[in-house]
Structure formats: structure tokens, C-alpha cells
Image (cartoon, rainbow, N blue to C red):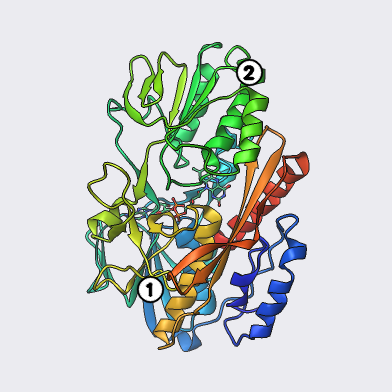
Amino acid sequence: MDRRNFLSKTSVALTVASPLAWADDDREKSKSKKSSEHSKPKTKPTPAPTPTPTPGGTVKSRVIVIGGGMAGATVAKYLRLWGDGIAVTLVERNSSYVSNIMSSMVLTGQRTMASLTYNYNKLLTAYGVTVVQGDVVEIDPVGVKVKLASGVILTADRIVMAPGIEFDAVQGLTDPNVMPHAWQAGAQTTLLASQLNSMTDGAPVVLTIPLVPYRCPPGPYERACLIADWLKVHKPQSAAKVFVLDANASIVAEATNFTNAFALHGIHYVPNAVISRVDQATKSVFTSAGNFENNGVVNLIPGQRAGKLITTAGLNNATQLPGDSAFRFAGVNQLTYASTVSGAGKVHIIGDASATAQPKAGHIANQEAKVCADAIIRSLAGLQPDPAPVTNSACYSTITMTQAGWLEAVFQYDPATAAMVASAAGSGASTGWNTENFKDMNTWFNALMADSFA
Ligand SMILES: Cc1cc2nc3c(=O)[nH]c(=O)nc-3n(C[C@H](O)[C@H](O)[C@H](O)COP(=O)(O)OP(=O)(O)OC[C@H]3O[C@@H](n4cnc5c(N)ncnc54)[C@H](O)[C@@H]3O)c2cc1C
């Protein structure tokens, strides 16, 4: 297995390898396995090899990574693992990372926040990444410099930005904690859990979904299923009063499974429900598909855009939704993830902040990070990027508190459109859901997080 071949695997195995030579016949062998592997996502990762030491400690080039989430942690690790003499500095504002993935299970009491928390020790000790806790407030894309809130300025040969997302303002919502999104795992996640626990039984529960593109397409639908299942036991009078207000015209991911699941749980699904405003005092939501007033809990997930730093740096040049006056996400060269803004070619943007046809998902963030690391290493060595990257994503969706379905997607680079496009081969979804998938989900999650942070 080699650096290039890991991308052509269709299974969800998060394989890594030595950055030495590769053979196209290995890719072919991998491709021929696709159909037989497709019946179910694979969950076992190949152990990571020891990182390539920097010969004599000589630093040949420097890369700064901004944001230590799914994308940033992975790119920092793999730049060190595969690169030769690349000094990597990861700047992250928090001392540890809390996974969004699985965080809806905190709402049902099945997970603790501690069980979703990852630190950066392994990146430092096993891979030699310099980890700096700090808030990046400005970048100079041309001078390749990064300024921290502390005033410290770092310089490098390349910058990788992985700042995730930020949320749109919602008219009438002056205190986001009244209607938490809990779409960035943290204080809002525990707040939403406590709101559900303390609400009056019999009160309606509303979950809103923004227009695509947003982080984790199946995520809101699976959260609605989990909450509805939990309510049956803990707030039975509210169980039949779960409303999903979707700004989109229809369910955007795993439509068959979620349609059936909503029928199972008695969830009221309302499409084309674009929020015009909310009233905090009465926990009411006013939408283009009707008004939903006097709710017990409102999980309001607003529209999303790239992390603020992308906009501050003028790198938001892609994706406009109706009514937008500015672009939301960062356009990238999909072979390298370099910014498409003129003069910013030494800045790479990966994960949810970038604009590609791939879903905004942690698994894809991990994959983009590897493509980006490979491209930077080649570029620093004066080589061209891999002309045919392949990425994959697996997603398990909790349909009940003990059962899950799954979705798998493969993306290949299309030279005609210069974009990653979904490939029918290797993509698919489970028919229904079961407890075995639920167990596999935990194995997949542990493998993904280990591949990114350990
Ligand atoms: C409820 C839920 C369930 C999900 N389930 C799945 C799933 O099953 N499968 C899946 O693949 N994906 C899932 N996702 C999506 C996944 O969590 C995201 O796609 C993924 O986290 C994106 O990674 P990222 O690195 O782009 O952003 P993040 O993981 O959000 O990381 C961004 C990091 O950048 C840091 N940062 C931002 N700005 C700065 C700055 N200026 N200075 C320093 N640091 C900064 C932040 O502190 C953060 O640590 C889910 C998401 C949610 C909300």
C-alpha cells in the first residue's frame, strides 16, 4: 500500500502508507475489489507506520496548519508522516478537540463529552508536530504569514487552513442558547441535552435544517430520529410532537431510510421551511411553510459558511445561496486544495471550509487532508500533484438508540470539470437499519479518530 493507493480504496478503511514509490497495478487491484467490498462499509484501519524522521533534523520547508479539527489534525500528521524535512506547526484555539461525530448521542445520554474529546499529544510525541494553542486572527496569503491574537507572527512556505464553519445570524435570535444549534460540539451540546431533559412533557420539539451545503448532510435527520426515540421513554407525551422544519425541498441524504424512519417515529417532516424569524420568548419559529409556535425545545441549526478567517482573508469565492451578498466557502483547486483566489496559491483550504461537491463530513475532511498533504509534499519537491485522486466517505446514521443505517460515497477527480465527482461504483446506502450497523459505527468512528489524532 502506498500514499497514492490509500485514496483509491472504496472501503472506509483509513489506510496509510510509506510515501515511497507506487505502482498503478496496485490501484487496479484495489479497483477490482470494489464490487465485492461494497456490500458493507469496512471499519478496520491499517496500522500507521512510523513517521519518516527528518534527516539530521534538517528543516527543508515549513507548513502552518490553522485549526486542529478533523481536517487540520490529519493534514498535520500526514505532512510529518510522509514529508521529508517538513516542519509542521498546528495552531488551534482550544486545548483539545471535541468530536461533532457521535455528539447527538450526548443528547440521549448514550455518550459523554469526555468520550468525544481528543488531545494533540500524539501529534506532538509520535509525529513531531509543533502544537501552538492560539487564535489566528489574520493571514497574509502572499507573504505566507499567520498572525495570532497574541501578536506572534509565524512564517512558512505553505499555509493549510482548516477552520471549519461559522453560523448565519437568525432574525430574532439574540441569544443562541435559547435555541441551540449544538452543531459544533461543545457547551451547546450539553445545553440542548439539559433543555430536552427539563422540558415539559407534551410540549413540541422542533429541529430546523438549513439549505445545503451544510455540515454533515444526514446529521440533522439522524438527530431527529434519535431524539424521537429517546422521547418515547423520557417524555412520551412529546414523542408524537417532533417537527423537522427543512429549508430544502426534500430530505437531502438517505431519503428512503429517513422517510421510513420518520414514519416509524411519527416525526412531522415539513419541507421548504425557510426560517424568516424566531421569537425567543415563546420559542416560536416562523417559516415560509408555516409558523410553529410555543415549543418546548427548538434545536435551530442555522445556515453555514466557512470559518471567519476565510472571509477575513478574502478567500471566500464560492457558493452563494438565494439572498446572499457574499460567497460562503473557499474555492479550491481540487487536486491540491490550493485557494483559487489569485495570488493565494500557497494557501490550501480543506475540510468544511472548502467548496467541493464532496459532503462536509469528518471522513471527507480526513481524506481531503491526505490529498492535500500529498500535493504539498510533491509541490515542495518540485513535482506535479497526483492527477487522479479518489476519496471516500462513510457515514452511519442512528435511526433508533440502538440501530443504524449507513451511506458510502466514492469521489473521483474529473479532469473535464476539474472537480471531484461522485462515482456510482462504490457508492450506496444500507437498506434499512439494524443493531449490527450500530456496533460497526463505533468501530468506524474509533478508526477515523485514531487515523486523525493518533
Ligand atoms: C452532530 C454532527 C454529527 C456528525 N456526524 C458525522 C458523521 O457521522 N460522519 C462524518 O464524516 N462527519 C460527521 N459530522 C461532520 C464533521 O464533524 C465535520 O464535517 C468535520 O468536523 C469537519 O472538519 P473540519 O476540520 O473542517 O472542522 P472542525 O472539525 O470543526 O475543526 C475546525 C477547528 O478549527 C479551529 N479553529 C477555527 N478557527 C480558528 C482560528 N482562527 N484559530 C485557531 N483555530 C481555529 C476550531 O477550534 C476547530 O478545532 C457531524 C457533524 C455534526 C455537527
- 415 or 438: which is nearer to us? 415
Identify the residue at image location x=22%, y=47%.
325
Q: Which residue is mark 2?
A: 234
Mark 1 or mark 2: which is in front? 2
Asked if the residues shown at circle 1 and circle 2 are in contact, with their CB atoms under 8 angstroms apart, the answer is no
Q: Is residue 16 visible?
A: no
Q: Which residue is mark 1?
A: 63
Crowd class of label 1 (few under 14; some 14 to 19; many from 20; radius 10 Å): many
- 40 or 150: which is nearer to us? 40
Q: Position of residue 321 (x, y in %)?
A: 32, 46
- Mark 1: which secondary structure? strand
**In which quarter of the view is residue 158 placed?**
bottom left
Q: Quadrant of the N terminus?
A: bottom right
How many labels, in total? Answer: 2
Quick one: label 1 or label 2, which is nearer the N terminus? 1
Q: Position of residue 244 (x, y in %)?
A: 50, 28
- Lateral position of residue 238 relative to residue 39, left or right: left
Badge 1 amino acid: Val
**In which quarter of the view is residue 212 placed?**
top left
| Tag shown at residue 76 | none
Badge 2 amino acid: His
- The Cα atoms of the two marked residues, 1 and 2, are separated by 50 Å
Identify the residue at image location x=48%, y=61%.
73
Q: Position of residue 432 (x, y in %)?
A: 72, 40
- Mark 2: which secondary structure? helix
Crowd class of label 2 (few under 14; some 14 to 19; many from 20; radius 10 Å): some
Q: Is residue 305 visible?
A: yes
- Lateral position of residue 20 relative to residue 183, left or right: right
- Lateral position of residue 285 relative to residue 206, left or right: left
CB of mark 1 near ligand 1 (< 8 Å): no
Q: Position of residue 186 (x, y in %)?
A: 46, 39
Does 62 sit above or below residue 292? below
